[in-house]
Amino acid sequence: MTLEAGYDVVVIGGGPAGSTAATCLARAGRRVVLFEREPFPRLHVGESLLPANLPLLDRIGVHPAIVERGFQVKYGATFSDQESQLEHTFYFARNKPWPYYAYQVPRAEFDTVLLDHARKQGVDVRQPATVETITLDGTGVTVSAEEHGQAVTLRARFLIDASGRDGFFASRLGRREAIPNLGKVALFAHFRGAERAPGRDEGNIRIHLFEDGWFWWIPFAGDTTSVGCVLHARTARGRGGPVEELFDEMVHRCRRVALGLGGAERITPVKRVANFSYVNRPRVGDRFLCVGDAIAFVDPIFSGGVYIAMQSAELAAEAVLPALADGRFEAARFASYERAVWRGIAPFFRMIHKYYEPAFLELFLKPRNYFGMEDAVLSVLAGGAFHRMPWRMWCGLELLFLLARVNVWVRRRAGLPVESRLEW
Ligand SMILES: Cc1cc2nc3c(=O)[nH]c(=O)nc-3n(C[C@H](O)[C@H](O)[C@H](O)COP(=O)(O)OP(=O)(O)OC[C@H]3O[C@@H](n4cnc5c(N)ncnc54)[C@H](O)[C@@H]3O)c2cc1C
């Protein structure tokens, strides 16, 4: 075993959050070591980016490498509901602090580009290498890891937990609170030869709601499409047997997906993720903080995960750099980081919960731009919540939520269902 010293920051995890935090710190001249358990490229769920992600890719200097890959461009998001037969496509708006498009990215490729970029910025990337224990004390953090079968121990002044849903810190030294009713089970796979929309709509993410949950449909450049379903508890409960069988049954029940996959061939096994909605604690402390999914994850319906991961990582680096310069690392100085992250995540949380209420969904799928309502929704869908929200937009969102409450009453009087689908 070797004891290596002299690092400013150690990062656990080489997903979008870990790569971004490490890149920002290394570009500011800090000595950073990053541990990633998996050899890359590796399959990962979470393939649809938001427009607000693109300026961030510019800021960390990786955008040219991303453009070079020729990822599928996404100009909008199409939502449809099988029950009401309502459908609407939101196109990202122009003249915003972010572009009017984003990318659809196979994560095996995207995460590799980000981690390679971190390496090029001077980050000492250990991979495959698994962090096993951490010990925080008054002068730093000791990390023990296994790297290529060898035990490694090193010291750094600060720790960033970017371990994703594993939540390294929360699972060993804190706690994870599941969010009731959300994030039950997701099944997903990649297909070749699935239906393609014509023209600019080709790259749109499509979200199809049906009785048992909802499907995502993410077209990649070339001929591959990612298709996945998030199921309500009552559908998933007590269902044993092969995941392929359940997935095929769900495809069969969702007409739009069944039609689109008519001539397609599945080219990956069906993967399953369960219980993926939670909030972790603590998120900051003396000499550590968490970024990305290691903080929380709610629901993928608005494709916010990768952006939140990278944006929280950039904010984290901005909080850690002055701490390294001052040599002071008490938890209190990271409180404003934690607040900034929650401010960005909160509108997603609120819209996600509302989305499952028929009264809100009806308005969402028939949007009107009264008092900037549609503009406000579009901004949240683009990832704009981390930016200061203009008052007009804030009012537009509040108005939408108010109208949704009125619509509950209208629907109840008309004898239509009002129960949140989260209870299903
Ligand atoms: C069903 C589903 C669909 C989704 N769809 C979307 C979508 O369309 N768009 C979107 O933006 N987001 C989506 N997401 C969310 C997205 O997957 C995550 O938000 C995103 O990957 C978070 O990035 P991260 O860097 O925090 O974590 P991760 O990407 O999970 O990276 C964490 C890394 O840490 C490594 N690690 C863990 N423990 C250790 C250890 N002890 N030592 C060393 N390394 C370790 C892991 O190997 C992993 O590579 C979806 C999520 C789910 C569940």
Image (cartoon, rainbow, N blue to C red):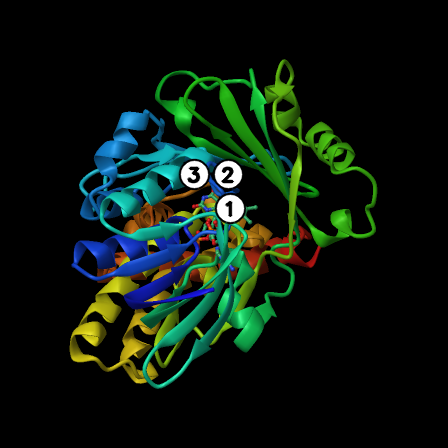
Q: Give how far apart the Cα atoms at labels 3 and 1 are.
A: 22 Å
The response on whether ligand 1 sits within 8 Å of label 1 is yes
Q: Secondary structure at mark 3?
A: loop
Residue at image coords 57%, 56%: 410
Q: What residue did someone put label 3 on?
A: 48
Q: What residue did someone put label 2 on?
A: 42
Q: Position of residue 262 (x, y in %)?
A: 65, 16
Sequence-wise, the earlier of marks 3 and 1 is 1
Q: Give how far apart the Cα atoms at labels 3 and 2 are.
A: 16 Å
Residue at image coords 83%, 51%: 238
Q: Residues within 10 Å of mark 1 (few under 14, many from 20)?
A: few
Q: Quadrant of the C terminus?
A: bottom right
Sequence-wise, the earlier of marks 3 and 2 is 2
Q: Secondary structure at mark 2?
A: loop
Q: Position of residue 189 (x, y in %)?
A: 61, 32
Nearer the observer, 64 or 205 = 64
The response on whether ligand 1 sits within 8 Å of label 2 is yes
